[in-house]
Amino acid sequence: MPPGPRKPVVQAVVFDLDGLLLESEQEWSAAKREFTRERGGRWTEAAEHAMLGMSSTEWSRYMRDELELPFEPGDISAAVVRLLMDRYRHGLPLLRGADEAARRIGARWPLGLASSSNREIIDLVLELAGWSELFVVTVSSEEVERGKPAPDVYLEAVRRLGALAERCVAVEDSTAGIGSALAAGLGVVAIPNRAYPPDPGVLDRAPVILESLPQLDEEAVGRAAARPLRPLRPPGRE
């Protein structure tokens, strides 16, 4: 019998943070809303969605220009980050199965983190969650030229891992994140954010779509690396 198809070699897995491992998009929005209202800005519900996936440089500039805050973007970012860090110290909003999934995948492959969060937030989360030794590489969008959906943060994570993008798999939850990872050339496991569902047109480009973190395993990563032509959906999903 001829040998079966060879399994793709996966060199590393790169996780998103907000909305995937942390139920944090609501926390970010609350901190931004609190700062805007306290400082006399003009908060809108549209702003909450507009800033999803933006880097700190991008959303702080948006808050100054669109929400009418009379502060420099750097000062806005620093103030919002302080508010969010206080929230996290009082209780880190890990999503169900996040710790187990990260450790399960980390036992098999080197892990990277590609996040739109500020560096201070990333480091605090890793400390509070006990993940400082688990993630080999972490990259903030503020450390690259463009935030998600541009590919920069994933390309930088792959570069620091010493891996090839086509041999890596990203785990993402959002429109901007899935688009970023695909643009960088990674295979993608999508676990859609329930509070802020990704755009169906972008979601359907992900090779593997799961319902939740407990479903994330070696087999799912392998399927994402193989990049099938049509997305593989969990049972019962239409």
Image: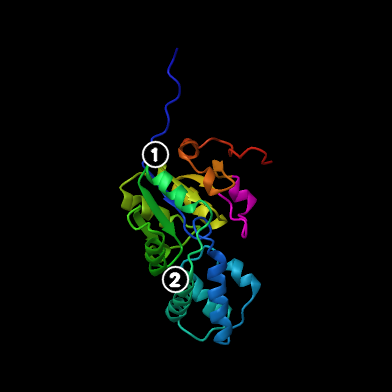
Q: Could you tell me residue 180's position as x and y percent?
A: 49, 54
Q: Which residue is mark 1?
A: 10
Q: Could you tell me residue 66's position as x and y percent?
A: 58, 78
Q: Is 194 covered by the magenta stretch?
A: yes
Residue for point 43% across, 50% down: 102
Q: Which quadrant of the structure image shows residue 168? A: top left
Residue 128 appears in the picture as rendered: yes
Q: Which mark is residue 188?
A: none
Q: Secondary structure at mark 2?
A: helix
The dominant secondary structure in magenta is loop
State how far apart marks 1 and 2 are (Cα).
35 Å
Q: Which quadrant of the structure image shows residue 77? A: bottom left
Q: Nearer the viewer, residue 77 or 87?
A: 87
Q: Secondary structure at mark 1?
A: loop
Residue density around tag 1, few if under 14, some if 14–19, many if 20 or more, within 10 Å: many
Which scheme is used to colour this image of the protein?
rainbow
Q: Which residue is mark 2?
A: 89
Q: How many marks?
A: 2
What amino acid is found at the position of numbered circle 2 in the picture?
Answer: Arg
Residue for point 66% across, 41% down: 237
In the displayed structure image, the side of residue 100 where residue 137 appears, left or right: left
Outermost front residue: 90
Relative to 201, residue 26 above or below: below
Residue 183 appears in the picture as rendered: no
Q: Could you tell me residue 134's position as x and y percent?
A: 35, 52
Give, as a single range, the part of the protein colored magenta.
191-204
Location of the N terminus by quadrant is: top left
Relative to 101, residue 124 above or below: below
Are circles 1 and 2 on residues that touch, CB within 8 Å? Answer: no
Relative to 50, residue 209 above or below: above
Residue density around tag 2, few if under 14, some if 14–19, many if 20 or more, within 10 Å: few
In the displayed structure image, the side of residue 155 where residue 28 appears, left or right: right
